[in-house]
Image (cartoon, rainbow, N blue to C red):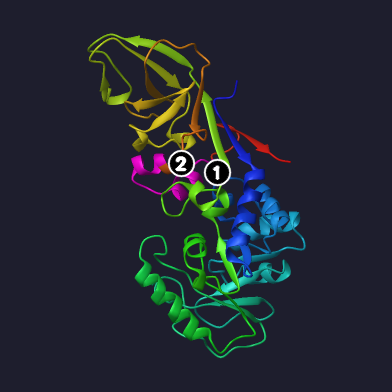
Amino acid sequence: MNRSELTIDLRALRANARTLLQRIAPAELWAVVKANGYGHGARDVARAALEAGATVLCTATVQEALALRPGFPDARLLVLGPASAEEVPQAREAKLELVVSDGAPPPGVSVHLKLDTGMGRWGLSEVPRLDGGVVGLMSHLASADCDPAFTERQIERFRSATANYGGLIRHLANSAGALRYPAARFDAARCGIALYGLSPFDDDPGTHGLRPVLGWRSHLAQVRLLPPGEGTGYGLRFVAERPTWIGIVPVGYADGFRRDLTGTKVRVGEELRTVVGTVSMDAFAVELERELRVGTPVVLVGEGVPLEAHARVAGTITYELACALDRGETRVSRAVVDA
């Protein structure tokens, strides 16, 4: 029996892509598959997104795009992050598209110029003199998930700065912008987190027509009765006040189930139960209502256990949790559901 299993539901990813396409039409959907597809597996999700109608695959680095190119020889691959001088020839040979946020565009490469409209990170202060290699103008929304007033200002800044460049494709919206701000959609929307069925607003993805793609399951590897005064885990952060059944799940922070997830809930059998004590490298404990058999299924993500709920307990965002789950085949197995 595997210690745990990640399930990637590509049917759900295709459904999310179609939902996003309906919301942003007539704009194009550009699928963000950086960080190994937010921990979901870049190759699998890239193929599913293209099949569902996405027209561009976006990565953070040249190396991520180069890894995808053999499997997608005809796809448009856009590198969102900076490329070093050593990587530009590789990008040119692989026909990658690059984002330029300072300096002169490299020759022989299709380029998107990035403007800083308020993120205060990468970006030009204005559109420079253009040459033939520039195919797009872009910017990035800083707070589309939480600050409508500033987002509207960014949209207007971008609109004003790019108004005289109708021959170039313009793209600004991320997932939050695509879902909440029609004016941000322009010619294309770069969607990452929503594509994976996770909400950029820390709410129920279903309210946006999205279906979570990721599932994570394990099992009870041990069940034991703690007498009053006895504890479990490092530091004995949980000590039983009464006779208490606990179950040990063979997953820990090395697998991406973080130490600050103590107090979150997982589904043990048919019941939501609380994680207690310190999450260790390879295991954590759950408090049980009664004795259960070893091997009882434990749902860590999915089936009423949303990643958004874990993120709230950990004080972080779903993006970070999903990316951290990609720990390789030695710790978790990966199953891809397709049709």
Q: Image point 55% across, 46% down: which residue? A: 39
- Whether residue 251 sits left or right of residue 230 in the image: it is right
Q: Where residue 240 is drawn, which disc sits there?
A: none
Residue 339 is situated, as x and y percent measured from the top left of the image, at: 74, 41
Q: Image point 52% across, 35% down: which residue? A: 302
Q: Are marks 1 and 2 in contact (CB under 8 Å)?
A: yes
On screen, residue 133 above or below 71: below
Q: Where are the magenta residues, as a range?
A: 309-326
Q: Quadrant of residue 338?
A: top right
Name the amino acid type tagged 1. Answer: Pro
Magenta residues: mostly which secondary structure?
A: helix
On screen, residue 14 above or below 6: below
Q: Where residue 307 is drawn, which disc sits there?
A: 2
Q: In whole angstroms, how far apart are the C-alphas of marks 1 and 2?
A: 9 Å
Quarter of the image with the N terminus in it = top right
Q: Secondary structure at mark 2?
A: helix
